[in-house]
Amino acid sequence: MNMKLKKFSNEMTLLSLPLLMIACGGGEVAQESEADLVTRARGIHDRVITLDTHDDINASNFTADRNYTMDLGTQVNLPQMEEGGLDVAFFIVFVGQGELSEEGYARAHAQAIEKFDAVHRLTEEIAPDRIELALTSDDVRRIAASGKKVAMIGIENAYQVGTDLSNIADFQARGGRYMSLAHNGHSQFSDSNTGERDGVWLHNGLSDLGREAIVEMNRVGIMVDISHPSKEAIMQMFEVTRAPVIASHSSARALNDVSRNLDDEQLMALKENGGVVQTVAFRGYLDSEKNNANRQAVQALEASIAEEMDFEILGGRGGRGGRGGRGALQGLSEDARSAYSANMEELRNTAASRMEAEVTSTAPPVDVADFVDHIDYMVGLIGLEHVGISSDFDGGGGVEGWNDASETFNVTLELVRRGYTEEEIGMLWSGNLLRVLDEVQAIAARIQAEG
């Protein structure tokens, strides 16, 4: 076992005791109770800058009547950030992969601009007294010190750039600070990890346009995001880029073999490049087997309760699953929809009351400890300075204990339990990512000075 991981494992065992033994000055040993540990973790959480690199948004939640000053039921909004002590959220300008045509590019570009405008509307018109847009690491520290929350912008899927690379500079001017060249599906720039499903590839890595895009991103100071592209494309990115890269929301493939995670070869290349991998709190990427067992147990419980109620769940998964359930619900009369909603509320309340006994005890959900296992692994493999934290909230992310921004403290608490110091926790939460941003922007300034 790696010595760093062995150290964490030993400390985890010690910290599970009712009284915790901690070293004091002069070789003395003091006992730290659970309450004292939580208090110490709370102090660390309040002092470090907590930064989440991936929070998806819907532009409809950035209007005068409906916006992030309200608790909208989203996993991220201002009330939840304030409650959980999440200082910085990268709001994501995402457009799903569409057809590779001028019409498709135009539609995607328009959708992207709508999301850029939404973030600016929140920070400049709706709630400038509570949140501000940051463009540099200095901005982040200044805004956080003022007591306001910090918004940053990431770009997921360069499909929306089209074939006009001048859009990259425009996206940077609008606040974009990282961009991935592909999402789920091959783009005009890069193959996606999804090619592993069928072995069909479009470019065998990067296209020529993709290589040009990386050069332009280096020039204007946008971090290259290697989450989602194919392994071959990612390895080619390391060859092309002059600046360190990030993986905005990926975990360790050695611990869970899914194509969205980074294998050890990719992680070692990222270390050599000087970049950072932002460990993602996405259940299916952290422990697929555990997550599938929990989902199946939850579905079985819901089906059992529905049978007891003599009630049919539309869509087959608690009324939450798929287009079939939504379509069937829309086909009901208003009275029938109202009755269905009342039954579903009763079902969920009953399921919640029985969850611990009938699900969690035998098929527990993926939780914060599973999430930090991936942090531990990557810290042990490539060094703490190359690892960070992300949630993928409102894009499928979240684990038991960190299901939304209001529960952000629980991540810090788990890190403290495993023996990470305040300095190390600060690096994981924001220091490493901001270091990469600084380096990318410094390299851009040098490239621009070269002409």
Image (cartoon, rainbow, N blue to C red):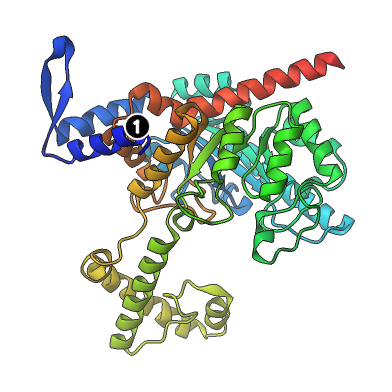
Image height of 285 relative to 210, above or below: below
Which quadrant would the N terminus be assigned to in this image?
top left
Please name whichever residue, 431 or 177, is drawn nearer the observer in this view of the structure: 431
Q: Quadrant of residue 295?
A: bottom left
Give the residue at x 39% y 28%.
425
Residue 42 in percent (x, y) is at 28, 31
The number of numbered badges drawn on the structure is 1
Image height of 257 relative to 437, above or below: below
Give the residue at x 46% y 84%.
335
Badge 1 element = helix
Residue 308 in percent (x, y) is at 28, 87
Task: Say whether residue 248 is visible.
Answer: no
Left or right of 360? Residue 105 is right
Please name whichever residue, 292 or 397, is drawn nearer the observer in this view of the structure: 292
Give the residue at x 23% y 70%.
354
Find the residue positioned furthest to the front: 1
Residue 137 in percent (x, y) is at 57, 22
Find the residue positioned furthest to the bottom: 310
Give the residue at x 59% y 41%.
265
What's the amino acid at mark 1?
A: Met
Which quadrant would the C terminus be assigned to in this image?
top right
The residue pinned by badge 1 equals 3
Please name whichever residue, 306 or 338, is drawn nearer the observer in this view of the structure: 306
Q: Residues within 10 Å of mark 1 (few under 14, many from 20)?
A: few
Please name whichever residue, 230 or 365, is drawn nearer the observer in this view of the structure: 230
Find the residue positioned furthest to the top: 26
